[in-house]
Image: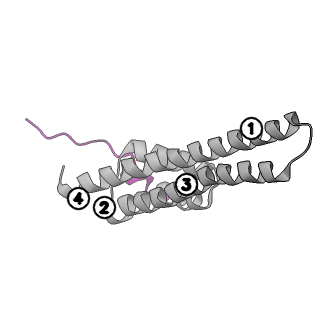
Amino acid sequence: MNASSNKGALLARIGVWMQVAQVVGVAFTVWGMMHAFEVLGASTAADPARLSGAIGVVLYSTAGGVAAGLVGCIFLTISITTYHYREPWIFWFLLTYGLLCTPFGLFFLVYCLIYRDEFLRPIQTAAI
């Protein structure tokens, strides 16, 4: 394995984890919104200031998840286009991510389907 493929592997792994961070950010957004409306429903008088404050806090997790997701997409794109990182696991991740129909996922879906033979080729081992 050369230095270029090591960089590609590292960027791919970081990019995938950042995509997971995006999903975690969305999950915390949903949880926080549910909690904010539970608090509003439990109070006797509706206080829009409390609700808007709670929603404002929840949106930080959304912003963090979106930022992590965008940086992760950049890392994945660099990994597969610049460093030509080709492993079966990244193919299956990109295929799954693309089927979720996110805007970047559509690019990854088309890319991995075009280059699927490069991703899924048998691993060549050196003869001893």
- Residue type highlighted by circle 4: Ser
- Residue type highlighted by circle 1: His
Going by the image, does 47 lie left or right of 107?
right
Mark before the other along the chain sequence, 1 or 4: 4
Going by the image, does 102 lie left or right of 1?
right
Residue 101: x and y in percent read 64, 54
Which residue is disc 1 drawn over? 35
Which residue is disc 4 drawn over? 4
* Residue drawn at (45%, 48%) of the image: 16
Dominant SS of magenta comes to: loop
- Residue type highlighted by circle 3: Gly
Mark before the other along the chain sequence, 3 or 4: 4
Magenta span contains residue 114:
yes
Which residue is disc 3 drawn over? 64
Q: Which residues are magenta?
A: 113-128
Instruction: Work out whether residue 116 or residue 74 is closer to the camera in this orientation and state it.
Output: 74
Instruction: Work out whether residue 106 or residue 102 is closer to the camera in this orientation and state it.
Output: 102
